[in-house]
Image (cartoon, rainbow, N blue to C red):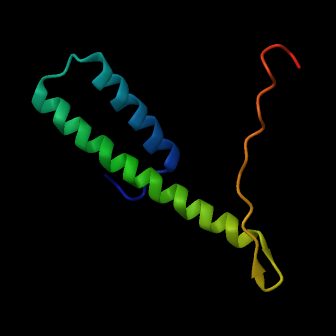
Amino acid sequence: MKEEMSFESAMKRLEEIVQMLENGNLPLEDSIKIFEEGIKLVRYCSKKLEEAERKVNILLKEGENYVQIPFVEKEEENKDGS
């Protein structure tokens, strides 16, 4: 895998690989080969996400201390509308 690949390209290729494997139409040898490619892509994407998280933490620097603010998703509204 090329190191120059963008995160978005890697994710798109990973989605393609998942679809190919889920279809189950590949011979075993090809399935293993494409699975290995998928594992490399997952590692690459994880590395890129970790780098992005470190950059965000640096940007949140306040004075001489770093303040790490965890990302929290908004809670979904209750299904009954309350």
Extreme-bottom residue of the structure: 64
Q: Quadrant of residue 61?
A: bottom right
Q: Is residue 59 above or below residue 78?
A: below
24 relative position to 80: left or right: left
Q: Quadrant of residue 3 in the image?
A: bottom left
Q: Position of residue 55 (x, y in %)?
A: 64, 67
Count of marks, rendered view = 0
Q: Is residue 51 above or below residue 42?
A: below
Q: From the top left corner, tell me how far across and down residue 75 is, in percent.
A: 77, 34
Residue 50 is situated, as x and y percent measured from the top left of the image, at 53, 60
Identify which residue, 14 or 3, lies in the foreground.
Answer: 14
Q: Identify the residue at image location x=83%, y=83%.
A: 63
> From the viewer's perspective, is residue 49 above or below residue 11?
below
Residue that protrudes farthest toward the right in the picture: 82
Image quarter for residue 54? bottom right
* Residue at screen point 10% across, 32% down: 29
Please provide percent x and percent y for residue 25: 21, 16
36 left or right of 56 in image: left
Q: Quadrant of the C terminus?
A: top right
